[in-house]
Every structure is written in structure tokens, then in C-alpha cells.
Amino acid sequence: MSRLVMKFGGTSVGDVERIRRVARLVAAERAPDGKPGRGLAVVVSAMSGETNKLVALAEDAGKGLSPDRFNDEYDVVVATGEQVTTGLLALALRAMGVPARSWQGWQIKVESSDAHASARINTIDATALGEAIDAGEVAIIPGFQGVTDEDRITTLGRGGSDTSAVAVAAALGAERCDIYTDVDGVYTTDPRITSKARKLDRISYEEMLEMASLGSKVLQTRSVELAMAKRVPVRVLSSFVEPGEPNPGTIVCDEEEIVEKQVVSGIAYSRDEAKVSLKGLVDHPGVAAEIFGRMAEANINVDMIVQAPSRTEGAVNMTFTLPEREADRARDILVAAKDQIGFDSAEVRKDVSKVSVIGVGMRSHVGVAKTMFEALSAKGINIQNISTSEIKISVLIDSSYTELAVRALHTAYGLDAVA
Amino acid sequence: MSRLVMKFGGTSVGDVERIRRVARLVAAERAPDGKPGRGLAVVVSAMSGETNKLVALAEDAGKGLSPDRFNDEYDVVVATGEQVTTGLLALALRAMGVPARSWQGWQIKVESSDAHASARINTIDATALGEAIDAGEVAIIPGFQGVTDEDRITTLGRGGSDTSAVAVAAALGAERCDIYTDVDGVYTTDPRITSKARKLDRISYEEMLEMASLGSKVLQTRSVELAMAKRVPVRVLSSFVEPGEPNPGTIVCDEEEIVEKQVVSGIAYSRDEAKVSLKGLVDHPGVAAEIFGRMAEANINVDMIVQAPSRTEGAVNMTFTLPEREADRARDILVAAKDQIGFDSAEVRKDVSKVSVIGVGMRSHVGVAKTMFEALSAKGINIQNISTSEIKISVLIDSSYTELAVRALHTAYGLDAVA
């Protein structure tokens, strides 16, 4: 018996009409050749808007509480959003004649860490679940939900539903995890920036991971990491179609399963960046550890670290990037420790963007960076910082050039759709 | 360690401000003499309006499903309303410095029958719960919720939260169950009908049961039955006060604990009544069973059955009452079976009310009925039907006389408040 996991986000289940469309899509997948032949588990989010409403209630009721006295009951409140959707989708399926039932996190069980509000799934006991779906009953599972080994409700943090779906697929040994979303697949770049963006048929886990963490919001990073670790093929496809309409989406899979590898698969960008520059930094061992230790303590992710000699004897300048929303907090922390760290000035710039070219083909091709720098230079775009990984080159530029840079690179790497 | 159960309905927890007032009332009961000394469990309903919203969603998604394919997932959906309140109240208490946590039905567990949407509580394992509250942590429990022995979520049906509270109190061996509501106690009759209605300090279970089932909506009938069976003293009091304000409420308890017994404790009425009259009924054995068997099959409760000779030889007339909303359905059922039952005509009147005098003192006092009939007669009110129990006399009258009858009886039995 083949098994499939389908996942629908908040917009896809935003009202009962949409839930009925989801039910039609589920019914069609259950019986692809007209007769039921496939075990199906469906992971759902809360109806759009519900989670925000529940979060606001919890934050109001628990005003002033520290996270360790807040998060467990916050989880009790917000987990109800997904529970409601599971019941409604089970009912909508039954109303179409399809056997279905909901399985809450604690019923399955989806055992997680006890890090409330940002728990991680440890194990899923899919024995009963697998038997039920093999017997032809569609299982509807709340995304985002878990339960500790002491039977307390947890949530996985925002966007955790993708991760739930992949984890369920892994536990069930499903042939694939289909993530239905409001786009019809993964594109070579953001179609809002260039109409020449093309939908990819396939993309490797590694590339998707870079895409996800670099601002392309199609899939949540953790879900891709998990899919890669458990080797679960994931398909991203549109939830806004009726059964029978073409909806191939994009398959996220092992690099080996991609026959025609591109050198560069996509261009990602992120406007949520800021650059911190420390000038006249005392050049002694441990100063970097001093700076980035403080950032790590404050839970601030830094990136693109560059150190350069200063004009002052025995001093250096250092720049690094971080999420724009953390910039002021980071500066305050550094300024408060100015004497301990030892520097002249700290400057923050928020008008910067990170643009990246991503492709597993880079591993075996030279000249990828050269193409990038030439293309940007030809448009008069100045590169402020550079960072690279095995399958990615990122540059920091003035944010007003973001679209121009993305379009130029899309063309330079031959990604433009043929008109 | 003494233990107390408090219960708050939907209006009392209608928004976060009200939940904070509830938290203040809970905090005051936990530490009546300034220091925590009492184990507290608090049972809560869904925020007012939420259950209706959830019911509407479930009915929309499950349109056309029979109850046996609808009710289990309906329970999954509607049970979330109470769950949200438990989390919010726990947070509000913690924000005031009071240790608290929520306990869902499946965590405790509150084991119920599998009659989804109208389940009955079988057993509550209060061991862990009792230990937690004795250690000073307030337990917040969703009313209305249970779990089957197969770990599926159930609900007890509308108004089940009172029953949950009494069941938890019984399981915890609590000294009392305080039901906070939008009235400040149980009255001798509806204060909207006469300003001379008085709040009772105490009322017996039996009397309260008659009051509850006769249209006084203060407490749900099942909760009173359970309190009587388990001998749990119940107090009805106002949730719209601040801690410290006088709020004695009404104690519902054993008859023996009421020192000054009244012959009549209260006057109840119900406008939700209809009268069915069958004329020219063939007078043979089994005809009553034929009629009331059909009503029972259709789940229609009948009351006040009266049989009288007809002018036709060998025939009788029969009248009985039933809830007004069932009247048309009952007539249709009878008319469809006219030939099998054997009668000339079926007539329904909806302009009738039932007025009852209730009091355990009736057991030992004579003349109670005489006082009633005289008082009604003095006002020119015609009695259509009469029924009696050990502690109650009910009459059916034209509904336009309802208020007049209630006021006359309230005066006749000496219940009027001294001005």
C-alpha cells in the first residue's frame, strides 16, 4: 500500500468553502485511478487569521510573564487553531463520502521536546496511524502541534506545519510529502521581480535549503532540513486548483535524482538585512569571540563577517550582517560593552540587501563567481560584502539596487524563460 | 487540606478583562485568610459566542451527515472553545503571581461514554489533579469536555460545564462546588416577574431539581442530579463582583441541612409548553402505550397526561403536554399513525404555560394544593391540567395569565419579600 502525506497551509483552509476544495483534492489523491488505493495523511494549519487571534489573546492574558511561565499555556491556547481545522476537514471529507478522522498530536503521539512555543519533534509513533490509513480512512493531523513525554501540549513555532508534515511522512515511510501552498512551485527567482522567472521541475534539498534560509518563503527551513535528513521527497504545489487541473509543482529531492543539473538553479534575495561596522577595533586575540559571543547570547544570528586593516596602527575594522529587526538591539549591546570590547565607533546601515546565486552545479564548475561580479559591475552595482558556501555566493549591496541585481543575474546565468 | 471547585460560565469569561476578574476571584478564594491554604480547581466554559461560532463551522463543513458520522468530529471542533479559556485563565492567574496550569479532559482524564455531543462522565481519575492543587497550584479544567476509553474527545452537550464542575468536585472530595453565574443566587421566583422575589439562602437538591427542570435556568438539571447523588454541596453565586464584595449566593444542599424549612420554597413557570388533545380515542388496552411509545421513539418528552371519558360510547379523550418546539413534529407523527392508533382528531395548543409550586415541606403539610387552587380561582384563572409529585404541584394555564398566576401564588404562599 503506497502512502502519501498532503499538507495545506492557513490560506488554503481559510474558510469552509476552501476546506471543501481541499477535501476534493484529498479525495482525488486517495483514488487516483478512481478506486481508493492509497493511504493518505493530511496535515493542516489553522484557518488563516486564527493563530494571530489566539496569540493576541494569550499575550493579553499573560502580559508581563517571562517565557518560561508563559509558553506552555500559550501552546494550550494556540494549538486549538489547528485542532479546529482537523475536525472541519474530517467532516468535509465524510460529507463527500470519504472515510476520515482527526488525530491530535497527543493521540498519535507526536512526541516533542518540552521547549514550549518552539518545540522540536522527537519521535512519532505512526503504528496506529499507518494501520488506519492503510484501511482506507484518511487521517487529518494538526500541523505545528506536539506533546511532551509528560503529556503537555507543545507547538513547534511559526511555520512548524511544514515540518510536521515532513515528520509524519518520514514516520509513515510515505512515498512523498506534498506541500500545497499559494504558489504553484519553486521559481528560479521571485516572479514579482522578473516576469522571466521560471518554475523549476526539480530542485535539490541543499539548494532549497539555501533558498529557504535566504528569504524565499515557499518552504520553512526546518522542514527542508528534516526532509533532507530523512530523505523524504517533497513536492511544492498550488492549493488553488480543482482536482484534475494540471498541478505538477516542484519536487525537492536528492541531487542524484536531478538529471539535468544547472550550474545555478536560482537567485534569492533578502531585504531584511542590516550591516554593522565596528571601526578602530583593538586587534588582539579573542576580540571576535568577545563580539560574536555577545551576539549569540542575545540570540542574534550574524552572517557575512569581514575583517579589514584599519588606518590606525594596531587596529582593525570589522563588518557583519544580521537581520534588520535585530540591528538596533545589536548596536545597543555593542555600545554598552564598548570599553570591554575596545573599539572607536559602531555604525549600523539598514539600506542593504543580500543577493545570492544558488546551485549545486557550482561544485563542479569554475567561473560562477566571475560571472556574478561581472554582471553586477556591468550595471554599476557596488558590492559591499561577499560570502560563499559550496553551493552559494552571496553579496551585500545597496538595497535600492535589489531588483536590478536579481534581474541581471537571472539573465547572466541563463535562467530567463524563453518568451 | 480543604478543596474547593469554582465554575465560571461563558459570560463570566467573555473577554480577557473578565478573565482577569475571574482570576482575582480565584486568587481570593485560594488564600481566604491572606495565605494560600486551599486546593482549588476551576472549571470554565468557552468564551461567550465561541461555542456558537464553532458549532456553525462544524455544521457547515459536515452538512448532510447523520449524527453518527458527525458528532465525534463536531466534538473535536467545539471542545477547543473551553481549551482556549483554560489557557487564558492559567496565564491571567500566573500574571497575578498565582501558580496555575490547565488540565484538558484527556490529561486528567475525565472518562466519558462515547455518546459524542451528549456524553456522560463515567469516571474522573483525580489523583494527579488532587496532588497538584494540594501543592498550591490552581488547576484550570475545561467544562463540557471528556475523553472516551479510546482517547477520543467528547463533549457533554450544552450546559455540560455545570455537570463537569460537580463531577470534578465529587472526584476531588471537595467541600463545595461554587457555580458563578450571571445571577446572584436562586430566587423564590423569577425576579423579572415580581420585584417581591427573594433570594433563598438554601434550597434542597430535590427542590432545585424541580426548579431546574421547570424552566428556571440557573443550574443545569444533570448537574443537580449529580450533586444530589454524590452529596456535593453546590453554591450558586454572582460572577459580576470584585473579591471582598458580599456574595453569599444560594447553597443547594441536603434537605437535612436546611433548618427553617418552608412549605413552599419557590414558584417556577415554563412558557415552552404545548398541549396535545386527542379526541375520540378508541378505548382499548394498549392504546396509551401505542401513543407514548411513538413519542418516546421520537425522543419527545411528554408530561401531564390526562384521560377523560368522551361523549362517544367506547371512546375517551386524552391530553398531554410537551415542549412547544416539539409540538408540530408530535402532531405529524400522530396524524401519520391515525389509523393504527385509532382516534378522531388531534389538536395542538401552544398558548399554554405550566406554573408550579415547589417545596419539600409539602411532604408533611396538607392543604398546599387547596391554597394553590383558591389563589388561582380568586384571579379567575382556569386550570387546564394538573400534575403532582411529592414536592411539586404543576398546573397548565392559558399563557396570557402566566405572570398573574406566579405573582398570586408568590403572595399566597407567603414568599413575598418584606418591603
Image: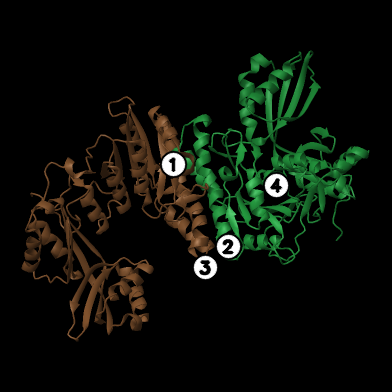
Chain colours: A green, B brown
Nearer-N-terminus badge (3/1): 3
Q: Residue at x 47, y 51 (%)?
A: B154
Gap in Å between the C-alphas at discs 3 and 4?
Answer: 32 Å
Say if mark 2 contacts mark 4, CB within 8 Å. no
Kind of residue indicated by mark 2: Arg
Question: Which residue is tagged 3?
Answer: B64
Q: Nearer the viewer, mark 3 or mark 1?
A: 3
**Quick check: do tags 1 and 4 share a chain?**
no
Q: Which numbered circle lies on residue A172?
A: 4
Gap in Å between the C-alphas at discs 2 and 4?
Answer: 23 Å
- Looking at the rendered structure, the secondary structure element under dot 3 is loop
Question: Which residue is tagged 2?
Answer: A94
On what subunit does the disc labeled 3 rest? B
Q: Position of residue A140 (x, y in %)?
A: 61, 53
Gap in Å between the C-alphas at discs 2 and 3?
Answer: 10 Å
Q: Nearer the viewer, mark 3 or mark 4?
A: 4
Kind of residue indicated by mark 3: Gly
On what subunit does the disc labeled 4 rest? A
Q: Quadrant of residue A392?
A: top right
Gap in Å between the C-alphas at discs 3 and 1?
Answer: 32 Å
| Relative depth, front residue between A88 and B193 | A88
Up-down: is B381 above or below B144? Answer: below
Question: Which residue is tagged 1?
Answer: B86
Report crowding for label 2: few under 14, some 14 to 19, many 20 or more residues within 10 A (C-alpha).
many
- Looking at the rendered structure, the secondary structure element under dot 4 is helix
